[in-house]
Amino acid sequence: MHARRNPGLSVSSTAYSSLGPSSLGSASFLSPRLASHRALLSPSPPPSPNLPSLIPRHGKKSSSSANHTRMVRRLLIAFCGVTVIVWLGVRSLYSPLPYSPSEYPSEGGEGEGEYEMVGDSSLPQDPCALIVTDNKGKPKWTVSIPSSYDFPLRPAQYVEICSQSMELSHHLTESGKTLSKRMRGYYEQDPWFLDVQEAEKQGLLPQSQPSGQPSSKDEGKIGNKVGEEQSGDGMMVCGRSLTFVMETADAGLGKTLMALWMSYGLAMKENRAFFVDDSRWAYGKYSTYFTPPPSPGCLQPPKSQILPCPHNARHILVSAATTAQTFGHMFNEEYEDGRKIEVQRQHNIFSLVREGYEALFSLRTDDATYVTERADALYGPVTEAGGVSIGMHVRRGDRHPYEYQYSKDYLPLDRYIETAREMILAQFNTTSNSRKSKSKARGVGSDEKTEGEKASKLVVASDDPDVYASPDMSHAIRAQDRIILASKTTLEAASPKKNPYIDEISGWEGGFFRDVFWSLGQPTSNAAAGTAQEVSEQAMRLRELVGRAYLMDLAVLAKADAVVCTVSSLGCRLLAVMKGWDSAIDGDGWKNVDGDFDWRGVVW
């Protein structure tokens, strides 16, 4: 049985009934006038009334007896018809037939809607969830991914599979009446799910086919290639695994990093081998930015066994399309500490992300060397002089603050500066009020500072090049200068326009915007073509520079004594993870200046 997608589903039923044979009796009709004349001319006397007979009459049955027999016969035939219809329905429900949609939702859709159960006698040609009958004769649902499909599937296909899975599980739950509640816990097993590997053993799905030698398109994949069974050293396929598919629909790198680190921490928590697939990553190859992740010591399973849901499957994947499925409401219910309040509820989730950061945030060798040298040059003298270093992360572009007053604009830069100064004063047990009183005692203009205050330093990183040139940031130092994103004004100053009537130069204006990212290296006519467009070598090199600059900014800021940023930015929340719970949360080494909001790990 498979399902056909039917947004306006209407269910109609047909009742079958059988009628018994009917017979027509013969009748003679007389004219009323002739009948009355006969009565008048009849020589016989009128009939006398008969007494009831004690002996049953023979011949014609009474009318009530005939009606009763006819009713019994009709009820019996109707009962037999209903029995046949019910039997056919039950047989269709429990038969091992596939469940497949007629179409996929649009890219990025929710995949919501109703499904009409449609019988079929063969496996579907497309990836989908389906109902089978296991070797014990019980109905189960599983997922079929034909071997002809490449890994990973399109995001819309993963969304559709999870939507179908929820519908089938709910359908079997209502039919079996074994579980009254629809929403299960994060780690509660679905009694109706049959894992692909088990379905293959029972002959309900075809055996997974190894992909053989990796092709050229597999070169970007990290770790063992999808589909390999065994290598020369005899490694076996992992018993349980989590594969993270690096992809992005909004062009941001921060969301990918947060999901990557959280997925790794979750895999370690659940004793799963961890793999990364970068074949569809808008930023290119994983190795362009990081050293390879830790080896799991086993091989990745066949691609047909890697499922987006349910979470209790042996081999699962996490991608931009399934983030809400893996890290949704039930994940928060499981990992948030309900006994605590505010940010303390997030400690377990923070720990998962932190574990991923410690294992995976290892920059490529030359960038890592630069970050170490840059941090020593910036913070070494400050530490030796007893000062404090404060990093400031200013996010602009298409990310606006949570605070309502600035939700359509950006926070003023002086808020970052004032918060950083307050943190420095607090470090040396002074306040702005006490400083003002001392200044008055010494006279106007005598703003004396301690040696530690004098040695303290402000370091800034921003996606908007104009922030560095702002007068408010005149005393702050750029976090890194290995890769600098220049504005149009800077580029024009360095290389004047050849034609004053043609705008030949475009810079990185106002911060990171998704449309600007997608248009890097592309003709003006294709400026906002998005992810579906082929990426040229020049465009990919520009994207790589943007990504590397972002990562080095974070790495240098994280080594400061404290950080000031806006929690509405994913980079800000990543900085808290990079500094650690004790330093950032308990030690107040991480300050949010965007309203009264706490750190949260799951904000998709």
Image (cartoon, rainbow, N blue to C red):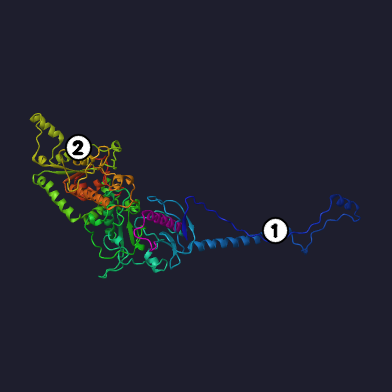
Distance of label 2 from label 1 (alpha carbons): 101 Å
**Which residue is outermost to the front?**
499
**Badge nearest the viewer, 2 or 1:** 2
Q: Which mark is residue 385?
A: none
Res. 421 image quadrant = top left
**What residue is disc 2 on?**
470
Q: Amino acid at mark 1?
A: Asn
Does dot 1 land on a helix, a strand or a loop? Answer: helix
Q: Amino acid at mark 2?
A: Ser
Could one spot residue 94 in this view of the protein?
yes
Pick the front one: 389 or 148: 148
Magenta segment: does it hold 474? no
Does dot 2 land on a helix, a strand or a loop? Answer: loop
Predominant SS of the magenta segment: helix
Magenta segment: does it hold 172? yes
**What segment is highlighted magenta in the picture?**
145-174
Q: Residue at x 13, y 51 (%)?
A: 373
Residue 371 lies, with reference to residue 306, above or below; the image says above
Q: Is residue 183 left or right of residue 10?
A: left
The image shows residue 515 at horizontal and vertical percentages of 31, 45
- Mark 2 / mark 1, whichever is N-terminal: 1
Q: Is residue 384 left or right of residue 47?
A: left
Pick the front one: 426 or 535: 535
Q: Residue at x 9, y 32 (%)?
A: 446
Q: Which mark is residue 67?
A: 1
The image shows residue 339 at horizontal and vertical percentages of 29, 49
The image shows residue 499 at horizontal and vertical percentages of 25, 39
The image shows residue 198 at horizontal and vertical percentages of 38, 66
Residue 513 lies, with reference to residue 80, above or below; the image says above
